[in-house]
Image (cartoon, coloured by chain):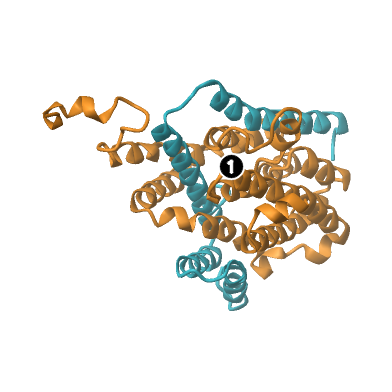
Amino acid sequence: MSSIRRTLEGSVLRDIALTCLAVLFIGLSYGAIAVASGFPLWVPAAQSVLVLAGASEFLFIGIVAAGGNPFAAALAGLLVNSRHLPYGLALPPGVTGRGWRRVFGTHLMNDESVVFALAQEDLPRKRAAYLACGIGVLICWPGGAVLGALIGSAVHDTNAFGLDAMFPAVILALIVPELRERVTMRAALVGAAVALIATPFLPAGLPVLLALAAVLLLLRAAPGDREPGGVPRGDHQPQAAP
Amino acid sequence: MKDTTLVVAGMATLAAGTYAFRLSGQLLRARISFPPRVTKLLEGAAVILLAALVATTALTQGHGFSGVARPVGVLIGGVLAWRKAPFLVVVIAAAGVTAGLRLLGVP
């Protein structure tokens, strides 16, 4: 942990701590809702550690509580969590750790840890931010869930405190620097619109994946600058040669 | 809770499958060497996913509309973030505005 403190700036660490605090509050409502739906404490406790992906856990609890088949609930949850595959593609190799450490580091992948990793400049900082946020969430999400399950009805109406606005606000605040690039902003807006239009018609999780179609806007955006990886630019501009 | 064994099996499926998703993207990335342009595209794809996640969690509940209070709170948080307000201010403003609107009877 001391190496994390040395690698990351104080402001980044503070933002990570606040994000984890928000996760703790959301965990409170998760635990409370789980026991209110008739689940024993160990269900949200075990799930928050082993699945460690909030939205899918809410969905699982909701479907099973409504009398649905647990396997159907697991499949619905997996659909929601399928976005972790493109997350893994977006992270530079080594961010989640190397060798056996990656077995643990992989489990720490979530919306928050990915967005903090992407925001850092170099690999050591990306890795430190990913780890710090991932471990923080690993503590705060189950901690909040267990606390919420214990307090139960006392925190039942967490919506009254506006806690449901915290998760989208946290993620939005974290992607704002990326959105200042106009091309990314346009693609993000189109992706968000696609997801919203699809939400009434498709099962949870799919609309967000459908938003990936907006990547096409990034593809078309910069036809001129393809020199770094593809064909050397010189080949396209023979007239530039003397 | 009806059938404990079945629920545990469902939980195990969700946990194992989620881990597989977390791992497979990384494995794919390690196998194939992407040109920098594609790497940038993949990062852009992650931002699009996150933006779609913000939109759906702010505006929808299940398959319907979430009500006005939550998206307004998130929007105000977003405007503050755009104007470079501190992170804490953004998050508290979003929750506070949403809670305040509900207190006033806005759904």
Up-down relation of residue A158 to residue A71 (above or below): below
Q: Does the rendering let one see residue A69? A: no
Q: Residue furthest front?
A: A242
Up-down relation of residue A73 to residue B59 (above or below): above
**B47 left or right of A116?**
left
Instruction: Residue A139 in the image: state x and y as whole percent.
Output: 79, 51
In depth, the one of A45 and A159 nearer the eye is: A45
Instruction: Residue B17 in the image: state x and y as whole percent.
Output: 69, 28
Q: Does the rendering let one see residue B31? A: yes
Chain B: give its colour: cyan
Callout 1, which amino acid?
Answer: Leu
Instruction: Residue B37 in the image: state x and y as whole percent.
Output: 39, 34
Q: Which residue is mark 1?
A: A123
Up-down relation of residue A164 to residue B98 (above or below): above
Instruction: Residue A46 in the image: state x and y as whole percent.
Output: 83, 41
**A4 left or right of A94?**
right
Q: Residues within 10 Å of mark 1 (few under 14, many from 20)?
A: some
Quarter placement of the C terminus of chain A: top left
Residue drawn where x is 35% and y is 36% of the image: A216
Residue drawn where x is 69% and y is 43% of the image: A53
**A98 left or right of B31?**
right
Residue drawn where x is 55% and y is 36% of the image: A92
In depth, the one of A239 and A24 nearer the eye is: A239
Chain A: give its colour: orange
